[in-house]
Image (spheres, grey):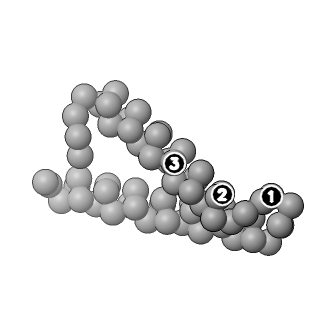
Amino acid sequence: MSTLALLVVLLLVLVAVLLVLAVGFAVHRYPALKGPVGAGIATVGALAAVVAVVVSAGGGGL
């Protein structure tokens, strides 16, 4: 795996963690948005679905 590919994977992981933490914080701050654990899991699932579509459209794996 090239250095560029590793950098892209690292940035994707960092963005995913940041996104999950942001959603978890927003839900924790405003309890009317329901449970933080459920929101975090839904966020991870949505992000995984988007990444899967992008990778499959690219015609290959990372």
At 18% from the left edge and 59% from the top edge, which residue is drawn? 3
27 sits left or right of 62 in the view: right
Which quadrant: the N terminus?
bottom left
Disc 2 from disc 3: Cα separation:
10 Å
Disc 1 from disc 3: Cα separation:
18 Å
Q: Amino acid at mark 1?
A: Leu
Q: Amino acid at mark 3?
A: Gly
At 58% from the left edge and 53% from the top edge, which residue is drawn? 43
Disc 2 from disc 1: Cα separation:
9 Å
Q: Mark 2 touching mark 1, by CB under 8 A?
A: yes
Q: Disc 2 marks which residue?
A: 39
Q: Disc 1 marks which residue?
A: 33
Could you say which quadrant of the image residue 40 lies in? bottom right
In the structure shown, which secondary structural element does the residue marked by tag 1 occupy? helix
Badge 1 density bin: few <14, some 14–19, many ≥20, Cα 10 Å = few
Could you say which quadrant of the image residue 26 lies in? bottom right
Determine if residue 22 is in view.
no
Mark earlier in primary sequence (1, 3): 1
Q: Work out whether 45 lies above or below 57.
A: below
Q: Disc 3 marks which residue?
A: 45
Q: Residue furthest right?
A: 32
Residue 11 location, x and y as percent? 38, 60
